[in-house]
Amino acid sequence: MKHRLTIVVVAAALTASCGDVNAAFERLSQARQLSADLLVQFTKASNATDRAVMADTDATSTTYARDAGTAKDTIHHDLAALRPLLAELRYSDETAILDQFEKRLAGYEQLDREILELAVENTNLKAQELSFGAAQAAADALAQSVDTVTPVSPGEAWHVKATAALAVGAVREIQVLQAPHIAAPEEASMSGIEARMKAAEATARNALAALSPLVDAPSRKQLAAAADALNRFMEVNARIIGFSRRNSNVRSLAMALNQKPARVAPCEESLRALADALAHHGLAKGRWE
């Protein structure tokens, strides 16, 4: 009877031990899956931010920014699921690595938010669209207006042609200066370009004023249209400068290239260390490690 009781107790202990090992192995398997998914989702989030920075439309950059947010939400969901598993397994070293990753992740997310906020503004793209669109149309309208004026006398034809060309050339100079202003990374460079734009505007306005006594009465209507076109052009140019000064695309790209890698690498290092640590656990030589 005593021998039979001993067998029963031993069998129960072995069953309990097997149950504990199975439960531990299941938790370890879940922890490994979550650890692997953390690296996948972090990579997705980082890549989506890069795509948002490089996107060439508002809709595309917004879509990629949303993708980055979704991946980061999944990261936090995985973290919330992984931490109690490590606690149940009593993996203090792995928990310390997870703590390290969360601290590094917080630093990454702070920078990532700044990059994405700038990227979706697309102010440099908006400035470029205005330069190629509304500014181009206004400049063309001015050129067409002064091209149709008639000299007050045949002897003034050369004078009218030269003065009209001066007005058009000044506006075209401003157009040419818009591109480097949009691309300029520093405010000092922008200020220098804006000074040249202002000087060119003065030249254009003076040229239009000088044309007035050189053309016949019917041509005054074309001169008025040219003046209106110049006003529209300068209004659009002011909007271009405003968007360009915000410089969101240039700034977000600079941050993504220069600052982001220093935040990404430590996070990836922690996640790989966690995966390696979890890989060393399990059954070895007939016992749980």
Image: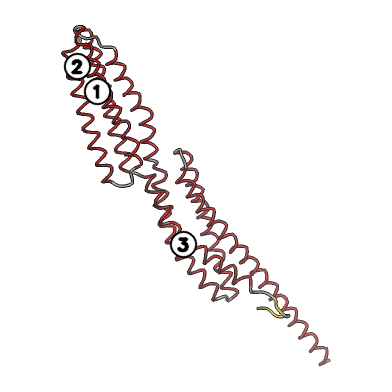
Residue contact at pointers 2 and 1, CB within 8 angstroms:
yes
| Camera-nearest label, 3 or 1 | 1
Question: Which residue is under mark 1?
Answer: 167
Badge 2: residue crowd in 10 Å (few <14, some 14–19, many ≥20) = many
Residue 105 is marked as: 3
Residue 82 is marked as: none
- In the rendered image, residue 36, in percent from the top left (x then y), is placed at 60, 62
Residue positioned 54% across, 56% down in the render: 43
Question: Which residue is under mark 2?
Answer: 211
> In front here: 162 or 266?
162
Amino acid on which disc 2 is placed: Leu
With 186 as the anchor, is 159 left or right in this view? left
Amino acid on which disc 1 is placed: Ala
Amino acid on which disc 3 is placed: Leu
With 103 as the anchor, is 81 left or right in this view? right
Q: Secondary structure at mark 3?
A: helix
Q: CA distance from mark 2 to mark 1?
A: 10 Å
Q: CA distance from mark 3 to mark 2?
A: 65 Å
